[in-house]
Image (tube, rainbow, N blue to C red):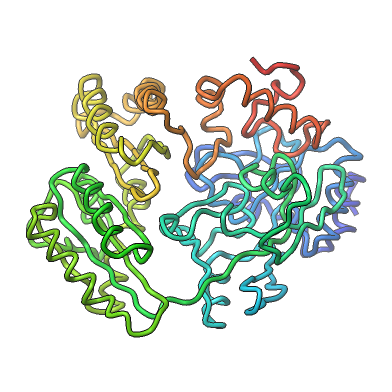
Amino acid sequence: MSTDPFMDALQQIVGPHGLVADSADRERFERDWRGNYPGRARAVVRPASTGEVAAVVRLCSEHHVPVVPQGGNTGLAGGSSPDDSGLEVVLSLTRMNRVRSISLADETIMVEAGCILQHVQEEAARHNRLFPLSLAAEGTATIGGNLSSNAGGEQVLRYGNARDLTLGLEVVLPDGRVWNGLSPLRKDNTGYDLKHLFIGGEGTLGVITAASLKLFPLPRHQCTAWLGLDTPRQAIDVLMLLRETLGDCVTSFELVGRATLDQVLARIDGTRAPLAEATPWSVLVEVSETARDTRLDARFEAALGDLLERGFVRDAVVAQSSEQAHALWHIRDHVPEAQRRDGPSIKHDLSVPISRIPEFIETTGAALAATFPGIRVICFGHVGDGNLHYNQSKPAHQSDAEFRAQIPRVHDIVHEQVARMHGSISAEHGIGRLKQDALMHYKSAVALDLMARVKRAIDPDNLFNPGRLLPAEAHHQGDIR
């Protein structure tokens, strides 16, 4: 037993396997994936059941100890790692990783929050079903984290984001009560739909411990192609024409800039250019169909042939096997890792109306180039839903310190363009600690006030992820502006 009654009580709740004591083992829970927000926790606790989560939360509430809920810790906005005060408890859900049930009649799967996204996909596939949420970090990201940040990923175009894929939740509230909102119902019009408070809430209102998720028929046919284009405007035209021709079969539509592709080819072993001739822009497109005998491959190739003939596409390659399709997706999915290996970078996860994506890319790129000569724009993203990952890598002649000194002004230029086009400064990564200042600047006063009121109503002592999403000082203000 230690000399700290609080720590002793924690260990009594979760047992010897539920408390991470070794400093080396704790490190991966105390820093974010990018390493921008290293911290120091009072404790790292890994409960194995909803009951244990509730007991830990009640204990923390009694001792007025802040709680930082954490899933796979793959977040990119600094919202799931502790600060450096040494006062916060990291509550990791990684031991809560069971699939509780699956119903083919209801087309649902009920999973605990610590389930790895890829494992949920695999369990669905084992029952000849599809869980369509898919993103680069799916091998380590957990369902609880995906829901807390309302993750989108690569198939939003057809299936929607995490919010659209969720039927119900089980949530531990800041006072330790458990709200069991798990349900397979598609329609339930009995008042406020409470699950939407916690999806995208970044752990500030409650700890998601389980979820009831939608399943879909497993696609019988799938086609993947890499297209070479001259402009982003052509990408929008291609998307419109493919949807007119193939309808909802268009599953994914990913834009990749030339500088982005070059960075992956230079930094990721085993990658090679999909097309013989380099083009200024590329699109990775995937189409799928669940019905039998649709001749999807013939229809897709005919559509691509028409696009080539009409000059919308300069060149194209269609994957002839699942291995070739995987190789094309390997390029897209390794863009973040390539940029990390390349050196310091400035990240933006934003959305603008799809129709204004070409204008945004042109005007923002010009503004950045005029202010910071030589800056490299790494632009890629889910054009089908308006979400761009619009990042910057440093010029070759600059030192890391010089580049980092430019971060505030780069953010200002990008966010000003987003606001001008009535977009969002965060499309799927969340606010965390990274984007609080921008949120306070660009979100309307009415929206911020409503958010603060909800936070105070559910977490009056501000113990759940304090200082993330909303600034800590906003919690006690009547009007946060």
What residue is at 56 percent from the left and 22 percent from the top? 444
Q: Quadrant of residue 398?
A: top left
Q: Quadrant of residue 154?
A: bottom left
Residue 346 shown left or right of residue 100 in the figure: left
Indicate the quadrant containing the C terminus: top left, top right, bottom left or bottom right: top right
Outermost residue on the bottom side: it is: 293
Q: Nearer the viewer, residue 327 or 293?
A: 293
* Coordinates of residue 20 in the picture (x, y in percent): 73, 56
What residue is at 8 percent from the left and 62 percent from the top? 276
* Coordinates of residue 438 in the picture (x, y in percent): 50, 25
Examine the rendering and report whether any part of residue 256 can be seen. yes
Q: Nearer the viewer, residue 315 or 436?
A: 315
Examine the rendering and report whether any part of residue 406 can be seen. no
Residue 29 shown left or right of residue 192 in the figure: left
* Coordinates of residue 330 in the picture (x, y in percent): 32, 64
Q: Nearer the viewer, residue 59 or 415?
A: 415
Q: Nearer the viewer, residue 232 or 186?
A: 186
Label total for image: 0
Residue 40 shown left or right of residue 294 in the figure: right
Looking at the picture, does residue 100 appear above or below residue 59? below
* Coordinates of residue 40 in the picture (x, y in percent): 67, 40
What residue is at 18 percent from the left and 71 percent from the top? 301
Residue 268 shown left or right of residue 318 in the figure: right
Indicate the quadrant containing the N terminus: top left, top right, bottom left or bottom right: bottom right
What residue is at 32 percent from the left and 70 percent from the top? 326
